[in-house]
Amino acid sequence: MNAREFLVVLAATALFLVMGASFLGNVNWLSTPTSVPVYNTTSNNGIANQMFDTFAITIILIAILLGAAMIGGVYLAKMDEPGKVGP
């Protein structure tokens, strides 16, 4: 095992130990489940209400960008097919 592989294993082990210590530490979990209002028709305190009222244009632009990225990824993947000439 060379030095680089040893450092990768050491970093992964350290990360695992930190995550394990934070998971097994003293955490005050709630004893009863709480409800999170996703969409509320009577008031504007739901998560969906706040997101789509405040960030509507941003969410639409992100959706268009992700759609274009998916189409571009499929196009680029099709270009690498063996025996295919041109895009």
Image: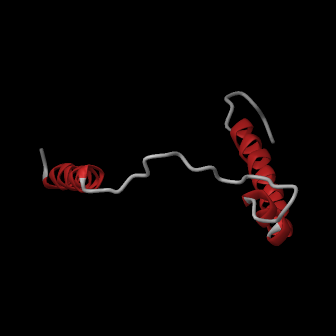
In this rendering, would 85 be left or right of 20?
right
The image position of residue 70, as x and y in percent, is: 75, 46
The image position of residue 28, as x and y in percent, is: 35, 57
The image position of residue 29, as x and y in percent, is: 39, 52
Where 31 falls versus 77 (above or below)?
below
For the point 73% across and 39% down, the residue is 79
Observer-nearest residue: 36 or 23? Answer: 36
The quarter of the displayed image where residue 82 is located = top right
Observer-nearest residue: 13 or 75? Answer: 13
The image position of residue 83, as x and y in percent, is: 71, 27
Check the picture and name the quadrant holding the N terminus: top left
Where 74 falls versus 53 (above or below)?
above
Check the picture and name the quadrant holding the C terminus: top right
Outermost residue, front side: 32
The quarter of the displayed image where residue 45 is located = bottom right
Outermost residue, top side: 83
Observer-nearest residue: 33 or 87? Answer: 33
For the point 29% across and 53% down, the residue is 19
Where 16 falls versus 86 (above or below)?
below
In this rendering, would 2 be left or right of 75?
left
For the point 77% across and 57% down, the residue is 48
For the point 20% across and 52% down, the residue is 17
- What colour-coding does the image apply? secondary structure
> How many labels, in total?
0
